[in-house]
Structure formats: structure tokens, C-alpha cells
Amino acid sequence: MGLFAGSPVLVWTLRALGLVAVAVISGLVWYYITNDNKPAPSQQADQPAKQGKYNFVAAPQLPQPVRDSNCVEHSKGKVQEFLQAHQCHGLTRQLFTVTTADGRTAYASVSSVQMASAQDATALENLTKADGTGNVKDLLLDGKATVPGLTRLDAHGGYASQRVDAKLIIIEADFSTDASDKDEPVLDDICADALRLGQGLN
């Protein structure tokens, strides 16, 4: 028999040490589990992906996205003809406002067109970029929202588009008042920044 065999003091000492060891191991396991779920500092810095040059706000006239399954009914011109032959899988649109540095309010219609393939989306984008070919209707032209002084958002050239796989994002924008053809550069800039809004529009 060992020197401390049968000693109550040794038995309770070993039990206490065992409990301490279990507590330490449990604490380490919990630490690693909870910290693995937290993004690294670089990931946290990248989180605000929706931040951009302009501060877009959902228009009060139409605060929620509008979803349609028939793109043909909500398009015009050669774009409509194309969509008759190449059916889309869905159309989601939303209206936003933005205030520029000179205090004017611009409206931007963000359209997300889900096509059957990336090839169809590319062909549709090329068609919308050409002059006189029509487009997917913006939300004002389509009668989904009403803004005093505005009936459409393509009058002064504000436009941008971006294909993301089989999805085509189309932006059109115009000022609610005092707009002219000279505003096209700033309207194009607004549209380019609004493309990020279409990436999450499904």
C-alpha cells in the first residue's frame, strides 16, 4: 500500500484538484467557442458594405420594395420585346431619395431584374445602355409612386447599370425640381452610387 493510502486528507485534496482542473478546462473551451464566432477586427471594419458617397433613404411615397413576376408588363420599347422572348424570373424595384450638397432632392428608382442566365442579363444590359431602346419602367413612369413635378426619372440622363451573375441592376434618377440636362453628370454619379442598393434587392 502507498504512503497516503486511505488518508481522508489526500482523497479530498485530489477531489478538489480535479474540480479545479475541470473548471479551468471548461473555461478555456467556452472562451474559444465564443471568440470563434466573433469576426476579426478586419472583418468588423468591412461590415458597413452599404456605406457610400450618398445617403439614400427609402422614399416615403413607397417605403417598401415592389415585386413583380412579369417584366414585360413593366418595360417598354425594344427592352420589352427582348423580355417577351427572354422571360425574366422576377423584378424587384424600390424608390429612394437623396439630398445633394446644393440642397436639392433627387429620386432614384432601383430595379433588380433576375434573368434566366448571365448571358441573358448581359444582353439586356447592352440593350438598356443603347439610345432609344426603352427600358424597365421606373416606379414613377409605371404609376407605382407619385412625386409632384415628376412623371418619370429618365428625362435628364441619370442612369447606371450593373450585372451580377444572372441579375441586372438598373438605376434611373432625376431631381424633383429645377432639373436640366446640365445635371446629367451628378445624376449619373448618384445612380452609380445607388448600384450598391440593388445588390441586396431580391
Image (cartoon, helix red, strand yellow):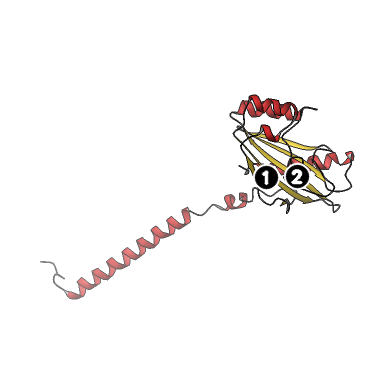
Pointer 2 residue: 108
Q: Are marks 1 and 2 in contact (CB under 8 Å)?
A: yes
Find residue 181 and report its image quarter.
top right
Indicate the amino acid at tag 2. Ala
- On-image quarter of the C terminus: top right
Q: Position of residue 31 (x, y in %)?
A: 43, 59
Count of residue discs: 2
Mark 1 is surrounded, within 10 Å at the Cα level, by few (under 14), some (14 to 19) or many (20 or more) other residues, namely: some
Secondary structure at numbered mark 1: helix
Q: Mark 1, mark 2: which one is toward the viewer?
A: 2
Q: Residue 89 location, x and y as percent? A: 59, 34
The residue nearer to you, when weighing 9 against 103, is 103
Q: Which mark is residue 197?
A: 1
Which amino acid is tagged 1?
Leu
Q: Is residue 87 above or below residue 180?
A: above
Q: CA distance from mark 1 to mark 2?
A: 10 Å
Q: Which of pointers 1 and 2 lies earlier in the amino acid sequence? A: 2
Q: Is residue 177 left or right of residue 162?
A: right
Helix, strand or loop under label 2: strand
